Amino acid sequence: MAASAAAEGEASTSSEDGSFTEPEEGWVGRLGVPVAMVGDPCEEVMLLWGLRDPFTARMGCFVDQAATTVRIEACGQVLDMLQSPSCLVRPGVTGSVLWDSGVVLAKALEHLADSARLPIRGSRCLELGAGCGLVGIVAALLGASHVHITDQFDRLRLLHRNVCHNLLPSHPLSAPSSSSSSHSHGSSSSHHASARKAPSSSGSGGGSGGGAKCRGGAGKGGSAAAAAAARAAISDGGTGGGGGDSGAWPEVVELTHGRKGEETRVRVRVFELEWGEDMVLPRFDGDDDDDDEVLQFFLEQAQPLFTVGRLPDAHLHPDFISRRVVVYCLARRRV
């Protein structure tokens, strides 16, 4: 849903004596808590680096990237998230393991939903650059009506295993429908095809080709797997499937498309996007030397299309806060 209210004017991030101050608060979309409204992207980056000093904070506070399985408590159950640490040695591969930012966002969604600050139940959600799929799985368990999770084609096997393993039909809040597919950033053909798909639980990256469905056989354990298959399927996000207008999805794809159609590379990895209807929640995990430039570019591209606010740490899950991670809330501007 587009923003119900937006702060007037631009947010200020510096006082008369030159010290950093938080920008003014406002409201974005259906989020039931005030956010710090983002004005000038350059000032926002200076504020974050000046006040949070992300590179002095420890990485890997909430995950063990060397493990093949990470256990995370969420939505009243223990999720066994499978990882593939060996794939990290491949250039450009980051979605084979969990990152702190994914855990922070997943737990923030749970915290906001439990406190009735974010109506996830019944929403249609899309996750771009899902990696292991934690955020999309949590959105499904919180009652999203449909969740579509996308990532690069060569990451879908791991994503498929996590969706099938953790979305159990016995959970009372599990979503009736979730799927995962590949999506290629920087590809105009993939961009237009994906824009026509209805939003669902997915993560994005490059790649194309066929997909594999989550299948359950007969016999012992077959019924549970078959029930999970009704909610979780893996297919190529660039062809067929879905229908109807997907709200902010075309703008989000355009936003992550990169400069002059170039592939976004690190930007795809740094920002993972989830939303209910037309509200977008990007997360930013500062772990590279050029992260300040990446974040500033993202905000500059977002502001003409979206009202942008930063979710204060006070509204994140109190046990899952990191100075390296920030969560933004975007709502599509009405024309």
Image: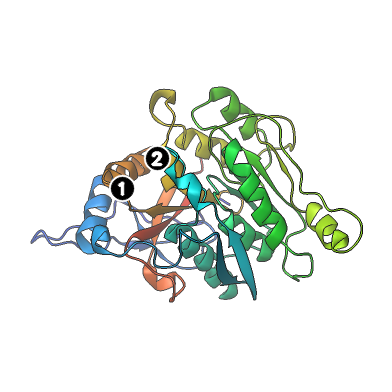
Answer above or below: position of 255 versus 22: above
What is the crowding at mark 1: few (fewer than 14 residues within 10 Å), some, or many (at least 20)? few
- Residue situated in front as seen by the camera: 329 or 216: 216
* Sequence-wise first label, 2 or 1: 2
Up the image or down, 332 lies above or below 197; here it is: below
Give residue 246's quadrant in the image. Answer: top right
Q: CB under 8 Å between callouts 2 and 1?
A: yes
The residue tagged 2 is 266
Q: Which residue is mark 1?
A: 288
Residue that protrudes farthest toward the right in the picture: 219
Does residue 305 appear in the picture of this structure?
A: no
Three-letter residue code for mark 1: Asp
Residue 316 in view in this figure: yes
Position of 178 compared to 158: left or right? right
Q: In percent of the image, x 60 and y 36: which residue is there?
A: 153
Find numbered disc 2 in the image and state the secondary structure of the residue it sits on: helix
User: Is the residue 61 above or below the residue 180 in the image?
Assistant: below
